[in-house]
Image: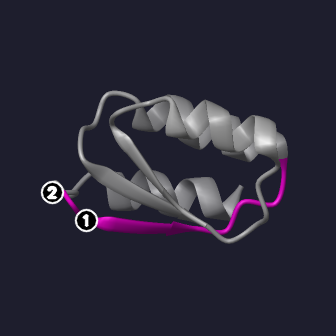
Amino acid sequence: SPALSRYQALSQSLTTQKLICLELTTPFAVQDAYRMHTFRSNVQIQFTQHLNDEQLRLYSSSSSISILA
């Protein structure tokens, strides 16, 4: 998807504490972004879609991801 392609391009030159704004429109895109992100530390992801409680628990349980609702 365009959003994931944009994420992949941004992630190539990321430094820690950089903010990534993702326009995620499907749960699959959210999951893919999460998987791609797990190997990075201290990087924040801002989701432009509303996350349900289950998704919030999933992301907040990872110490490497900060969720900006």
Residue in the picture at 72% in, 60% down: 24
C-alpha gap between disc 2 and disc 1: 6 Å
Q: Where does the magenta region start and end?
A: 17-26
Q: Quadrant of residue 55?
A: top right
| Residue 18 part of the magenta segment | yes
Give SS at disc 1: loop
* Circle on res. 5: none
Q: Quadrant of residue 49?
A: bottom right
Q: Badge 2 local density, few (<14 within 10 Å), some, or many (20+)?
A: few
Q: Main secondary structure of the magenta part?
A: loop
Q: Which amino acid type is shown beneath numbered disc 1?
A: Lys
Residue in the picture at 67% in, 68% down: 23
Give SS at disc 2: loop
Give above or below for 36 relative to 25.
Answer: above
Q: Position of residue 67 (x, y in %)?
A: 50, 55
| The one of 54 and 35 positioned closer to us in this rendering | 54
The residue beneath circle 2 is 15
Marks 2 & 1, CB-CB < 8 Å contact = yes
Q: Where does the N terminus fall, quadrant-wise?
A: bottom right
Q: Which amino acid type is shown beneath numbered disc 2?
A: Thr
| Residue 25 part of the magenta segment | yes
* Circle on res. 18: 1
Residue lying at the far left of the rendered structure: 15
Residue in the picture at 57% in, 42% down: 33
Taking the image as shown, residue 69 lies to the left or right of residue 63, namely right
Q: Badge 1 local density, few (<14 within 10 Å), some, or many (20+)?
A: some
